[in-house]
Amino acid sequence: MANSSRARAAKARSAASVEPADKAGLNKLLANKLARTYGKVRQDFRATFADLELRPAALGVLSLIVDNPESTQTAIADLIGVDRSALVPIIDDLERRGLTIRHRSMTDRRAHALKATAAGIALRDQALKRLWQHESRVFACLSQGERHQLNHILDKLLAKSPVP
């Protein structure tokens, strides 16, 4: 009886370690691997920044506003490559939280200029420290050379991919 229990347990362990079928070959597609990798990166990012209530897009926008004071919403949208309307809810949230100020531009009264508050600058600086820790954790399995190579490949894809 003990032998049959061990046999069943061994069979269950063996079945659990079998890779699921991928007849369509999705696991060989680079886009699929990038998406799955991004899912892991995003999961760690959310855990790292949960108490600060920061998502990647908000951190990126806040950082650009800190580094480019008095930029317009359009300029920030152009820097990150999104439509200005997609940026508005992020800026609304940053402003509601007291991290940024939006006011009429001194050079173009039709446009809104953005400036980070002292709280926004402090939060961005705190978040950057965590961001480097997050980066180290996510890519710990890669050597410095592999990180450099991956960075180069991703830069090339961003710059030269025919997909907008």
Image (cartoon, rainbow, N blue to C red):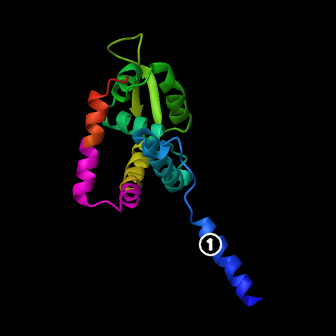
**Vertical position of residue 154 compared to residue 75: above or below:** below
The answer to whether residue 67 is visible is yes
Q: Which residue is mark 1?
A: 13
Where does residue 87 sit, x and y in percent of width and height? 48, 26
Q: Residue at coordinates 57% horizontally, 51% vertically from top-left?
A: 21
Q: Quadrant where the N terminus lies?
A: bottom right
In percent of the image, x 35 and y 55: which residue is there? 132
Which amino acid is tagged 1?
Answer: Arg
Where's the C terminus, which quadrant? Answer: top left
Q: Is residue 162 left or right of residue 116?
A: left
Q: Is residue 11 magenta?
A: no
**Residue 22 left/right relative to 29:** right
Q: Position of residue 135 (x, y in %)?
A: 37, 55
Residue 157 % position (x, y)? 30, 34
**Which stretch did the figure color magenta?**
133-152
Secondary structure predominantly adopted by residues drawn in magenta = helix
